[in-house]
Structures are given as C-alpha cells and as structure tokens.
Amino acid sequence: MTLNRRQSMGLMAAAMAAPALPAYANTKLKVGALRFTSHAASFVAYERGYFAEEGLDVEFEFFQAAQPMAVAIASGDADFAVTAISGGLISLAEKGAAKVIGGALSEEKGIDGQMILASNAAHEAGLTSPAGLDGKKFGVTQAGSSFHYMGAKIAAAEGVTPEFVPLQKVPAVIGALKSGQIDAWTIVPHIAKPLAGSGAVQAIGMVADYLPDYQVTTVFTSTTNAAEERAKTEAFLRAFSRGADDFNAALVDKTAGDDALEEMVKLIHLYVYTDREYEKAKPSIVNGAMRINANAALNMASVQDQVDWFKAEGLVKDSVTTEMLVDASYVEVIS
C-alpha cells in the first residue's frame, strides 16, 4: 500500500508519541526471596508493576535459608536475590560465581530490629540476658550463616561461649526453640515479636545493641550479570529501590498515611503469613518493619566486619577480600 505525505506524517507522529519500550522488554528473571517482611521491596516492586515498567518479567523462587539461595544464584537457577551474607555466598564470590551489588535490610537506631530470644525452659533456668549464653545451645540454620555470625558477635561481646546448633531451615529453628531443644536464637522482629508476645519464647535482648549498623541483608547476583548485563542489573535495582521507598514510607517512616499503610500490609500479606487471616497477620507485619536501604546503598564497614569474622573463624579462605564479594559500582557505598 502506498501512503501519501499526510498519512506518512501521521504514522511518524504516532510512533514518536508512543512510549518507548524498556531496554529489557519481556526479560524473564527469577528472584530469590524468603517469605519475610524484610524482603518486601521485591514484593512491592512486583505487585506495583515497577519490575514490569523496566521490562522485567519476574518470577519468585522462595527459599528457607540464605545459603541455598547463594547456590541458586551461582548455578543460574535464580538471577537476583536478597538475603544475608553467608560463608557460602562469600566462597562462591571468591570462586567468581556471585557478587553483592547493593544493600537491603539494615539495623538502625530508633527502629526495633532483630531480637535475641530464649526458650521458656532456658529462661526459667536463668537465661534472662545474652550474658547467660555460656554453654547454651544457640540455634542457626547452617554453620557460616548470618545467625552464626550474630550469635558469635553477641557471645564475644559478653565473653561467653555458646554451642551453635545447625538446624538447616528457619521453621526448624522456631520449632526447636519453642520446644526447648535449643536455648536461644536471633531473628527479625516480624517473627520474634509474635513468638515472644504469645509467650512461646522470651525476648532477652536486641541485636542492634551489639551490631548497631549491621547490614543484615544484601542484593546479589551472578558475577556474569554484574559484569556483562549492566543495563539489566541497573533495571532490577531501580525497580527494587522504588519498592523499598514505598515500603519505608508506609511502614518505617509512616509518612505516607494510614491508607498507604493498610494497602502496604495487604500487599505484603500476599507473601508473608499467608496461612493467617489478615487481621491476625497485620500486627506482626506492621510491628516487624525494619529499614530497607534507600537506593540499595551498601554499608561497606558492616560487610567488611562480616568478611573479617568469616575469615577469623576459618569459614572462608584467608585470601578473600571484600572486592571479591562486592561490585561497588552499582550503588552508594557507606564506609
């Protein structure tokens, strides 16, 4: 068909007016996550279309511990993930398989953070503060997990030596603590507060008192993505950061208003405490909100402390450096 000048100009104008497709239109991604409030930035970015606006077709892959998530990134079974730094993640980074590209959850003064819990049996026997952890059984998912790091740092500050008991998955640790098979544990507030509030366990301290600027979780990906797929990685971080901004405004700073808070809690409930009715889940979600770093900024001083501890414990090679673990070119680095 031959077009006259007017028709040609009309088509050109329509093409110019049409919104440009994102650079990664319809790119499929698997994002690793835990069903924790602390992973809400990803859930918000998905539900509010921020990933889609970047052209990213996201599917979540859910895990029950940090180290298996790191393995999934290295194997290509997941593209991006948010979780704590573990010995497994550091070792994979040392082998050139994974890179931390940003920060997520962090401890912040004035915001209730991770809690130190004791079983009822241990509490009744005198474990009423972290100073009493000597010889006690402290639950962790795996040796070299963030729970191991937190427990060891708390113990060192108190001059005590607990026994670390690996139980592989968070639900298993919860069950062991409630039944008294272990004596203590640390966990994020959306889990800790309901457990303590119900009388199933007892709160005996706060992690922030020992690790006040702890970079609890990070955003990470494969080394290949970080090095060779910059536009895609930046697109992911942009969408993730928008989700974090919405989360912080609604639940941490509470500057977005009551309606926004209610909407945010309902969104998170699609992923967290899905086995509870909304009204029962809401208090735990609201009271368990911790800061997710704006623009995925990364606290490098905390990351360095974690790497140093893993090295000192012989859980990773002495030759490991933070440069092996972190690609600092993507986000603001806090020293």
Image (cartoon, rainbow, N blue to C red):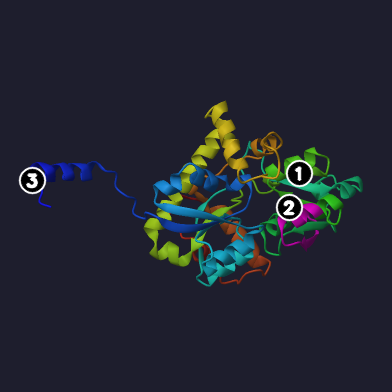
- Label disc, if present, on residue 154 of the rendered structure: 2
- Label disc, if present, on residue 4 of the rendered structure: 3
Secondary element at tag 1:
strand
Compare residues 164 and 323 and report the one nearer the observer: 164
Instruction: Examine the image and state in which quarter residue 109 appears.
Output: top right
Tally the marks. Answer: 3
Q: Is residue 298 above or below residue 167?
A: above
Cα separation between marks 1 and 2: 10 Å
For the residues labelled 1 and 2, say whether their Cβ atoms are less than 8 Å apart.
yes
Q: Residue at x 76, y 44 (%)?
A: 205
| Amino acid type indicated by mark 1 | Gly
- Label disc, if present, on residue 179 of the rendered structure: none
Cα separation between marks 3 and 2: 78 Å
| Amino acid type indicated by mark 3 | Asn
The numbered mark, 1 or 2, whose residue comes first in the sequence reads 2
Q: Residue at x 61, y 49 (%)?
A: 214
Write down the region rendered in magenta. Answer: 156-175
Q: Is residue 174 magenta?
A: yes
Secondary element at tag 3:
loop
Q: Is residue 124 left or right of residue 75?
A: right
Q: Nearer the viewer, mark 3 or mark 1?
A: 3
| Percent coordinates x, y for residue 50 in the rendering | 44, 45
Q: Is residue 124 left or right of residue 150?
A: right
Q: Is residue 66 above or below residue 254?
A: below
